[in-house]
Image (tube, helix red, strand yellow):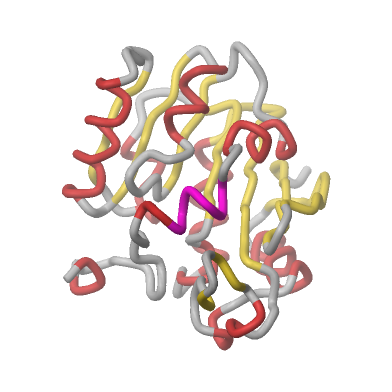
Amino acid sequence: MTSAIPGFFQGTEMPNSGWWEALWPDPAAVLSATGIKPGMEVIDLCCGDGWFTLPIARVVRHVVAIDIDADLLEAARRRLAESGATNCDFVAGDAYELASLVSRPADFIFMANAFHGVPDRPRLARAVRATLSPGGRFAIVNWHQRPRETTIVQGEPRGPRTELRLSPEQTIAAAEAGGLRLTELVEVPPYHYGAVFAPAE
């Protein structure tokens, strides 16, 4: 079971692809809304099976896909290989150790549907800050803090348990405690928001 992997973040197991793809029919639009642009060096942190990694690779210069689950990382590798993407590296590792997992600073770090399960969020924010280039950005895409029974996809409640969900204010406070500052807060319909951060001065 995925969640038994040491260091795996609570409530962040990869769902079956059917409802995930129904929830995110246009992942490229999510990336655009949070600020990913051509020419960037990007990290897809806690990338899972690569649903966002592939559209990132189609836009940017280079992407590093990182996940602690080697099986999910292999699924991501297959997804990109089948699509002919060659500008991606795949790294199995702990998100807390981010700075030691990559060889150069990132212009943008993207993290979707995982921050809610991080036990020590300021620690992760510090790891991200240490990995960003000057002027770099960190986007956290989170489920809104709504009751799980109200976030319906394909006729069923989806997403993490209600008590695991974070409000934008909670996400912002945790990131600020790790040395980041909010630059933008965007809606990511139907059930998410994107909080974008830069290193604090």
Q: Residue at x 32, y 25 (%)?
A: 80
- Above or below residue 151? Residue 114 is above
- Give the x, y percent position of residue 161: 50, 83
- Give the x, y percent position of residue 82: 26, 21
Q: Residue at x 34, y 59 (%)?
A: 16
Task: Assign the N terminus to one quadrant of the image.
Answer: bottom left
* Prevailing secondary structure class for the magenta stretch in the rendered image: helix
Q: Nearer the viewer, residue 47 or 183?
A: 47
Left or right side of 74 for 41: right
Quarter of the rendering containing residue 171: bottom right
Q: Is residue 2 magenta?
A: no
- Give the x, y percent position of residue 4: 19, 74
Left or right side of 108 for 66: left
Number of numbered discs visible in the structure rendering: 0
Q: Nearer the viewer, residue 190 or 184?
A: 190
- Give the x, y percent position of residue 105: 50, 27
Q: Nearer the viewer, residue 103 or 149?
A: 149
Magenta span: 19-24
Task: Assign the C terminus to one quadrant of the image.
Answer: top right
- Above or below residue 49? Residue 102 is above
Q: Nearer the viewer, residue 141 or 104?
A: 141
Q: Residue at x 57, y 38 (%)?
A: 27
- Above or below residue 114? Residue 38 is above
